[in-house]
């Protein structure tokens, strides 16, 4: 199967549109015609060099929705013609984490950091026969892709692909940061730091959980304006600007939870975010930082005396197999905004332009609409 894909050849670098060859599915593989792909900031970090790439050439993209075009002999959960979303963390259903309802921490997730397909052969090659790495075993910046069965979830056929692809990462990650990792309760004061494709869904999740005040913090005027439409009660350009309002709302105690979803996490940002939460409050971090960076500047006496909690959150601290159908049903019931997150759609050859718009703060979640 021939396909056009956005390929990275070096770091830092630009995505280049190349013709590649997608192999027929192996016994446990699913071949997909990608119809829509969300552009997550994690993929942009590959191009900038902020996140490592294990192998070049490398196809970007891990938020995808499409149609199954072929399946391997051992595949049981989907069949040709099914609509699916891709999941960047494979879930085996058998390891300790899956068995305890934490499929987002499945041991199979280690494979997403391996070149190509880990111990297996490459599923995609250049026209000259060179293996091509796939982001998170997926590579959804391609018209067609071939992925493990563990990396797809079947969805209803009446859901638009441009909205469905968002539940592959950004929506559950942001929503779950508030509802699960942050354990937001009715009446809470919540700060959301960074309101892009993840943070905007933290805003939605916090409001859904009953927060009385959701304070959206983002330097982009456009994103601050949009945050109000998704449930923010007030917005600020920086945490420093928001400090007085947070103190006023909490009698000087600090927010019940601060949810961090900035494009690139730094120690300085994490330290300021930790300072913003009250005693026994929670700092939830979904953002990635550069590998090797370490340390959060904080008064070491504060941890014990203030009982603050720093909570990491992967895929919203929830199992993909549970989260995806639940969130899509909420969307169908009018309880979750998905269509509104897609500020603009792009063609595959506009992928670099789309990320320029991300950096300019003029979009929430750009989406590639594939042509075939």
Image (tube, grey):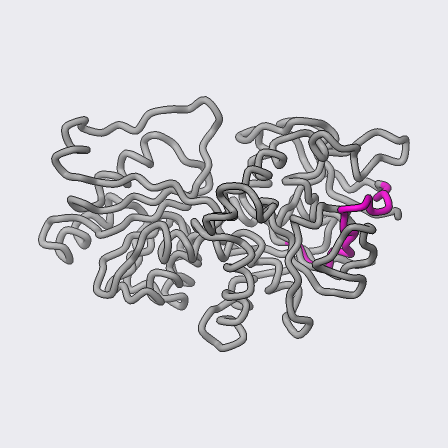
Q: Where is residue 337 in the image (x, y as percent from the top left)?
A: 48, 68
Quarter assignment of residue 294? top left
* Rendered residue at 77%/54% (across/down): 32
Identify the residue at the far left of this view: 251
| As drawn, 224 above or below 5 | below
Q: Which is more toward the observer, 15 or 35?
A: 35
Q: Which is more toward the observer, 222 or 208?
A: 208
Q: Position of residue 19 (x, y in %)?
A: 85, 42
Quarter assignment of residue 214? bottom left
| As drawn, 52 above or below 349 | above
- Does residue 82 appear in this view? yes
Q: Which is more toward the observer, 221 or 282?
A: 282
In the image, is 245 to the left or to the right of 109?
Answer: left
* Rendered residue at 39%/51% (across/down): 177
User: Which quarter of the figure is the C terminus placed in?
Assistant: bottom right
Q: Where is residue 80 in the image (x, y as percent from the top left)?
A: 80, 62
Is 270 inside the magenta-drawn segment?
Answer: no
Q: Which is more toward the observer, 313 or 79?
A: 79
């Amino acid at each position: 199967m021939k396909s056009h894909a956005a390929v990275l050849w070096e770091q830092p670098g630009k995505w280049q549109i190349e013709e590649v060859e997608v192999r027929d599915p192996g016994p446990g593989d699913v071949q997909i015609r990608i119809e829509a792909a969300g552009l997550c900031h994690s993929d942009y970090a590959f191009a900038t060099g902020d996140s490592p790439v294990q192998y070049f050439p490398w196809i970007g993209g891990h938020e995808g929705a499409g149609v199954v075009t072929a399946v391997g002999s051992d595949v049981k959960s989907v069949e040709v013609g099914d609509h699916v979303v891709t999941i960047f963390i494979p879930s085996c259903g058998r390891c300790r984490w899956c068995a305890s309802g934490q499929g987002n921490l499945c041991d199979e997730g280690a494979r997403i950091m391996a070149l190509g397909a880990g111990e297996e052969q490459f599923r995609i090659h250049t026209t000259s026969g060179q293996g091509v790495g796939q982001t998170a075993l997926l590579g959804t910046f391609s018209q067609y892709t071939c992925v493990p069965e563990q990396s797809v979830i079947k969805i209803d056929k009446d859901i638009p692909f441009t909205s469905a692809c968002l539940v592959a990462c950004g929506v559950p990650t942001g929503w779950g940061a508030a509802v699960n990792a942050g354990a937001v309760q009715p009446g809470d004061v919540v700060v959301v730091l960074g309101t892009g494709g993840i943070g905007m869904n933290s805003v939605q999740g916090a409001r859904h959980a009953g927060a009385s005040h959701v304070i959206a913090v983002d330097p982009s005027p456009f994103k601050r304006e949009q945050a109000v439409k998704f449930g923010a009660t007030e917005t600020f350009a920086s945490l420093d600007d928001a400090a007085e309002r947070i103190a006023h709302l909490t009698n000087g105690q600090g927010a019940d939870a601060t949810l961090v979803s900035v494009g690139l996490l730094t120690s300085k940002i994490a330290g300021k975010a930790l300072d913003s939460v009250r005693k026994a409050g929670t700092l939830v971090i979904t953002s990635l930082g550069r590998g090797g960076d370490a340390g959060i500047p904080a008064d070491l006496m504060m941890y014990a005396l203030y009982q603050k909690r720093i909570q990491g959150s992967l895929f919203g601290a929830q199992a993909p197999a549970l989260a995806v159908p639940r969130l899509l049903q909420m969307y169908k019931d009018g309880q979750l905004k998905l269509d509104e997150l897609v500020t603009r759609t792009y063609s595959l050859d506009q992928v670099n332009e789309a990320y320029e718009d991300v950096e300019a703060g003029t979009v929430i979640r750009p989406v590639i609409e594939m042509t075939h």
